[in-house]
């Protein structure tokens, strides 16, 4: 099986894999076979839980491989710099808000007596 290039047809260069991604690639298929009805999101969540349970010694080979891939990537693409792509935001249609109307029966705004029972009790305490 030929190894796929890190450069896509459009010239985009992928980032080197980190330790978690290397580990998850090996374990995702095992977890998927053990849980055939689980969704990809559930599998990813379980992978994250399992990764956090590993000790530093158990993670060390994956960090070493990650470092090796990073060095190889730097040699292949010496001028490459990670530039995160900004997400496309959805266009929100602007709907004109209705004209605000003056509140009715509110002493604070109109200076007139209020009709609300709670407001009347509060007003009696203030006066």
Image (spheres, rainbow, N blue to C red):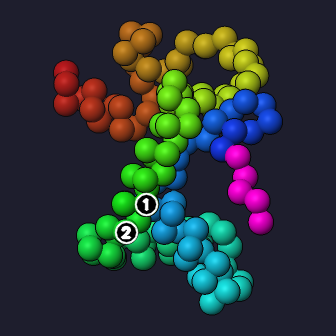
Q: Residue at x 71, y 57 (%)?
A: 3
Magenta stretch containing residue 2, yes or no?
A: yes
Question: Residue 73: x, y in percent?
Answer: 52, 42
* Label 1 packing within 10 angstroms: few (<14), some (14-19), many (20+): some
126 to the left or right of 88? left
Q: Nearer the viewer, residue 84 or 74?
A: 74
Q: Give the quarter of the image for residue 14.
A: top right
Q: Nearer the viewer, residue 38 or 5?
A: 5
**Is residue 45 among the parts visible in the rendering?**
no
Q: Residue at x 50, y 72 (%)?
A: 47
Dominant secondary-structure state across the stretch colored magenta: loop
Write the start and end of the magenta stretch as one range. 1-5
Q: Give the quarter of the image for residue 92.
A: top right
Question: Residue 28: x, y in percent?
Answer: 59, 74
Question: Residue 65: x, y in percent?
Answer: 43, 60
Magenta stretch containing residue 69, yes or no?
A: no
Pointer 2: what residue?
61
Q: Residue at x 60, y 30 (%)?
A: 85
Q: Residue at x 55, y 12 (%)?
A: 102
Question: Residue 114: x, y in percent?
Answer: 42, 24
Q: Which mark is residue 65?
A: 1
Which residue of the protein is positioned furthest toward the right in this rendering?
9
- Above or below, 42 relative to 72: below
Q: Which mark is residue 84?
A: none
> In the rendered view of the protein, which quadrant contains the C terminus?
top left
């Amino acid at each position: 099986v030929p190894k796929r290039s890190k450069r896509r047809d459009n010239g985009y260069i992928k980032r080197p894999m980190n330790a978690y991604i290397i580990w998850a690639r090996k374990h995702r298929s095992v977890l998927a076979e053990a849980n055939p009805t689980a969704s990809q999101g559930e599998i990813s969540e379980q992978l994250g839980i399992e990764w956090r349970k590993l000790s530093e010694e158990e993670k060390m080979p994956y960090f070493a491989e990650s470092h090796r891939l990073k060095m190889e990537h730097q040699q292949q693409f010496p001028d490459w710099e990670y530039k995160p792509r900004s997400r496309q935001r959805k266009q929100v249609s602007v709907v004109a808000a209705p004209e605000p109307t003056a509140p009715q029966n509110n002493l604070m705004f109109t200076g007139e007596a209020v009709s609300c029972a709670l407001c009347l009790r509060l007003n009696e305490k203030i006066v």
